[in-house]
Image (cartoon, rainbow, N blue to C red):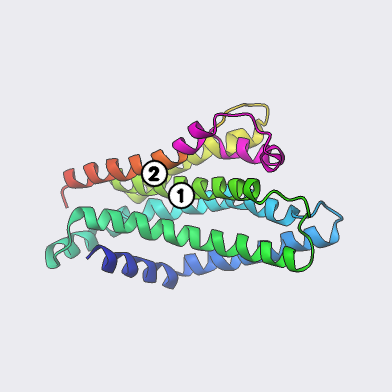
Amino acid sequence: MLVTLFWHEVKQGFRSWLYRGWIILTFFFLFFFLLIDFTSGAEAGTGVVLLLYYFAFLGSLYSVVVGSAAITGEIDEIADSLLSKAVRRWEYIVSKYLSQVFLSLFVFTLIIGLASLILWAFDRVSDDLDWWNATTLVGMIALVVVFFTSAGLLFSTLASRTVFAFLMGMGVWFVLIFLFAVNPQWDFMYSPIHILNNWDLIMEGAWDIDWWKLVSFYVATPLVCVGVSLLAFYQRDL
């Protein structure tokens, strides 16, 4: 049943006009940033770095918005589904998390992969590029996307209305993204902006931080979100 629910949610996501609009907008920025890479005399690979900033800003914002409405926006349908089918509550919650993370990472992987292939095909990849460090940078931003997707879904489970879930999600986004974007002198290892502001050091393998703490934060937090969502959802009167 979990797999069935997962694919149902994925199909619903691909049918969503909001998701399709997100893909179209992202493709626009893909070609816009590649145009900058090719025509501005910028360092090779700048287009991918700009895309990572795009996903850290708008990608995280989109993830919070969509995640915030994923459960509170379907509360009536949830009750009908749980009553009319052999659907367990944990299956519903886990399928929501897995499908939303899949949909978010699908766009991220598609765009970053396509941009990298185009730059490689046109010899816009530096010969001394360290692929391990580049993969580390891309992987960290992927974890950022997963983090905000999970946060949005958590608040969607906890809040009684979609607007409350949205406001809570926006609060997290505002603190971790916006505040650190307008105050670059702030030094907070777990902020996505702090990660991107040190992208050159990451590419050189010279960023001196406790990597295990950073990775653990972005891996453990989504798992905690799932656990708290399950506890809250089982206590919820549908």
Label 1: few (<14), some (14–19) or many (≥20) C-alpha neighbours in 10 Å = many
| Left or right of residue 85: residue 107 | right
Q: Amino acid at mark 2?
A: Pro
Q: Position of residue 171 (x, y in %)?
A: 47, 38
The answer to whether residue 172 is visible is yes
Residue 212 counted in the magenta span: yes
Q: Main secondary structure of the magenta part?
A: helix
Q: Position of residue 16 (x, y in %)?
A: 43, 69
Is 133 above or below relative to 19? above
Is 13 above or below relative to 140? below
Element type at mark 1: helix
Element type at mark 2: helix
Residue beneath the point at 28% across and 66% down:
3
Q: Amino acid at mark 1?
A: Val
The magenta stretch is 190-217
Is 96 above or below relative to 234? below
Front residue of this view, candidates 184 and 144: 144
The answer to whether residue 70 is visible is no
The residue under label 1 is 146
Verify CB contact (< 8 Å) between mark 1 and mark 2: yes
Residue 192 counted in the magenta span: yes
Residue beneath the point at 22% across and 60% down:
78
Residue beneath the point at 61% across and 38% down:
195
User: Any mark on residue 41, and which?
Assistant: none
Which is more N-terminal, label 2 or label 1?
1
The residue under label 2 is 222
Q: Position of residue 82 (x, y in %)?
A: 16, 61
C-alpha distance separating marks 1 and 2: 7 Å
Q: Position of residue 115 (x, y in %)?
A: 67, 63
